[in-house]
Every structure is written in structure tokens, then in C-alpha cells.
Image (cartoon, rainbow, N blue to C red):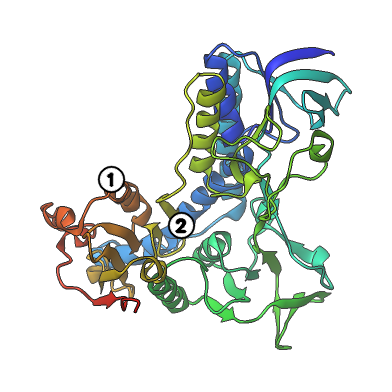
Amino acid sequence: MDHHVDLFVIGAGSGGVRAARIAAGYGARVMVAEEYRVGGTCVIRGCVPKKLLVYAARFSDEFEDAAGYGWTLDKPAFEWAKLIANKDREIARLEAAYVTNLERAKVTLVRSRAKIEDANTVCLLANGDRVRADTILIATGAAPALGAEIAGLQHVISSNEAFHLKDLPARILIQGGGYIAVEFAGIFHGLGSQVILVYRGENILRGFDDDVREHLRSEMAKRGITIITKQTVDAVEKVEHGLCVELSDRKSFVVDQVMFATGRRPNISDLGLDAAGVQIAKTGGIAVDEFSRTSVANIYAVGDVTNRVNLTPVAIREGHAFADTVFGGRPTAVDHTDVPTAVFSEPELGVIGLTEAVARERLAKVDIYKTSFRPMKMSLAGRDTRAFFKLVVDGETGRVVGCHIVGPDAGEMIQLAGIAVKMKATKADFDNVIAVHPTAAEELVTLREKAVSYQREAAE
């Protein structure tokens, strides 16, 4: 063997880097292989650059709203190329910081694709070197899945390419209804593009609370985003003035860019999993137990490649827990329940816990508290938009089992509200907190009247 390490990590994304650093801190000899860029999807072409584009898109509203507060501004001018260049500069800085942190932790970074040859051997494809590893961690994340093969699929981009477009498309059609689709719909619309969102289901954001889904769809439509549901893109054809997109109902649109945000698939191909005997779960991700151990005793997997809860902070927590378990002598299982999350759509979403529908399936009694109101900032701005707050409560215990927010700073609010939900706070606990006025967040502690209450009939 060319090398022998205690831990070999495949993938230098958020989960892999955290696991490597913590394991090295426990004294392990660690090597990390990365074939693309250090930082993974989140840092390089995911949540970080996406949030920067979200900030950019929101300035268009700020310029308009300023007039209601006495500001007179010249007509703003936007430069897509400048935004992308500045974004790229910041991502490069963050990537360098990740590399520096690995170096400080004395982790060996290898720029190569890695393939597992057996339970203890990894081959570095860049130079053919083989590494003997006592423990292997797979943290290769996931990649965009464009779906079924259709005519003209070669003209379609994913979110990966959206971050590097040469020009801002004047017209863009986005297929999908999840996080990425609705976020990019808001980004492109805010920057000046005409946006059409096409989704195969009944409504966008499947899996979220139905009231939240309906509220966001209404707000997006009010802003001028065209949302078409129960349809799919059947074909894309390059024409003289752009791309002609044909939907399953035979309607067609001519746009400048077509983007598919139809889900992500775990990066498991050509990793040598079969050779090592690593099993794949029905979800398409690597099958693992509560400690992220695969079917092979010394091989583990964390993050999106396991297709459990595909969020960057979850991958980081899993990576840390893995290192604590294997190298720190402290077996740690990650709790995947009540994970707060945000969708940086426009308006923003922040949610944690059960939806109303799931709560009604699981609980004998459910109380719903909700409100919709015009945010105070919009009173002088004159913008037609509304916020939405909803609490789902176990009617028997009073525990708040779900919190759903749509509106400005929803992501910030749900991080703090998530602490209370995770601690099993009751509606009375929320009510006992004095409101901070005037804020939108005070609605969380001033909701007094039940909107509706459900009681499951007792079985005979």
C-alpha cells in the first residue's frame, strides 16, 4: 500500500470535512479525497451562493419600497456579470478557508476521485495510489437529477449551471416544485426575468403544510410568477428566438433558458460499493444505521448520500457524531426528528415539526392556531403581500408539535422557535412569553384563538 490511515473520507463537503477535522482532533490519521472543489454542494454550488443570489434579488423590492419612506432614487441598473463575479470571489474565499481548516487539523487532502476496492482499500484514480484505511467514510453528497429522457434535454440546465450563466435570461422556465425550484423562481424574478414555474403535482412544496403551500403559491403569483401545476415538460426545441418548451397538455412557451429542479440523486455511482458489499436502501441512498454505519462494519456514510434528511446542517451533525462515535469513544446517534428548515423563496418560509395533516394522522386531538397579516414594513411601502403564521398543537398535552412561518426573516425566526419546539414547549409556554413589539415574531406568542380543533373518533 502507498499509504495507511485511520480514516479515509471520500468527499470534502460539509459532512466529510467536519468528520475529518473532528476525527483528527481525536488523534486519528485522516486523509480526504475530493475530485471537484472543497466545500461540497452547499459552499460551492448550493445554499451559500444561492443565498447570495437571494440577497441580490431582494434589492429590487427594497428600491421600490424606499419611495414610500421618503427616498427618491434614480432607476436602479443591475449587472448580472458583476454579481456572478463577486459571488465567485466569495466562494473561492470560503473554499480556501475550508482547505486551511483541514490543514490546521493536519488532515491530508488529496485532489482525486476515490474508489473503494474492498472494505479496507481505496484507490486514488488520479495517480493509481492505493490507501489502506481502518475506517472509510463516504460523504459524496447528491447531484441534480433531470428525470426521464425527453427530446431536447441537452438544452436544459440544472441549478449547477444556473450559478454560472453568462447572461441573465430575460425569460426562464423552471420545472420543479421543491426548495430549489421555488427559490430560483424568486431569484430570477427579483433580478428581472419573466419566470414560468411548471410542476407535475397538485401544488408546490410537496411535504410542507398545505396552508403554507397555498399561501406561498398565492404570494408568488401576485408577484408575477406564472405557476403551472399538474403538467410536465415533454420536449425542448431550439428555435430562432430561444427555446420552445412543450408541456404535457401540448401548450408551448418560448423562453431563453430552461432549468430543471426535479430532485437530487445520491452520488453512489462508480464508488466501488458492490466490491465492498455496501448495501443501498430503497430510497436510493446508502443504507446506514443510527450511527451512520453501513452494512460493512468499518464503512460509514453521512449526508445526502444516505438520503435521510438532506440538509447541510444535518450532514455536519452526522459527520461530527460519526467522529465522536468511532474516534472519540462517545457513541452518538443523530436525532432526525424536528429539524428546522428554511426555504429562501419570496416570501421566505421557516418550518419545524408536524404539518396539520400529519398531526391529524398521528394525534388524537389537534388544535390549530394561525393568522395572516400585512407586515408592518409594507404599510408605507404599499406592497400587496401578507405574512402567515401557524402553530400545530397536540390538543391533549398542549405541546407545540409544529410551527410554520411565511414572511420576512422566517428562517431567522424558525431557528429560535425551533429550540422551543425541540424542548417540547407547550402552547401555554409560548403564551407566557411577553411579546416583543412591534415585530412579526410576536405573533408566535399572541395567538390566542383556535382557528380549528380536530378530535379523532374513538375506536369501537
Check the image and report above or below for 179 versus 339. below
Disc 1 marks a residue whose amino acid type is Met
Q: Specify the label residue 423 is tagged with.
A: 1
User: How many numbered marks does the figure carry?
Assistant: 2
Q: Front-most of 187 and 75?
A: 187
- Which residue bears the numbered disc 2? 344
The quadrant of the image that shows the N terminus is: top right
Check the image and report above or below for 242 versus 53. below
Q: Position of residue 31 (x, y in %)?
A: 69, 20
Q: Which residue of the protein is positioned furthest toward the front in this rendering?
A: 460
**Image point (50%, 66%), residue name:** 207
**Image point (52%, 15%), residue name:** 25
Check the image and report above or below for 419 versus 223. above
Local secondary structure at mark 2: loop
Marks 2 and 1, the one that precedes in the sequence? 2
Q: Front-most of 274 and 101?
A: 274
* Viewer can see residue 373: no
**Image point (34%, 62%), residue name:** 405
Res. 218 image quadrant: bottom left
Q: Position of residue 48 (x, y in %)?
A: 53, 44
Res. 391 image quadrant: bottom left
Q: Is residue 444 left or right of residue 186?
A: left
Q: Which residue of the protein is positioned furthest toward the right in this rendering?
A: 128
Q: Is residue 422 left or right of residue 43?
A: left
For label 1, the crowd category at 10 Å Cα-Cα, with few meaning under 14, some 14 to 19 and many 20 or more, is few
Disc 2 marks a residue whose amino acid type is Phe
Q: Front-most of 115 and 178?
A: 115
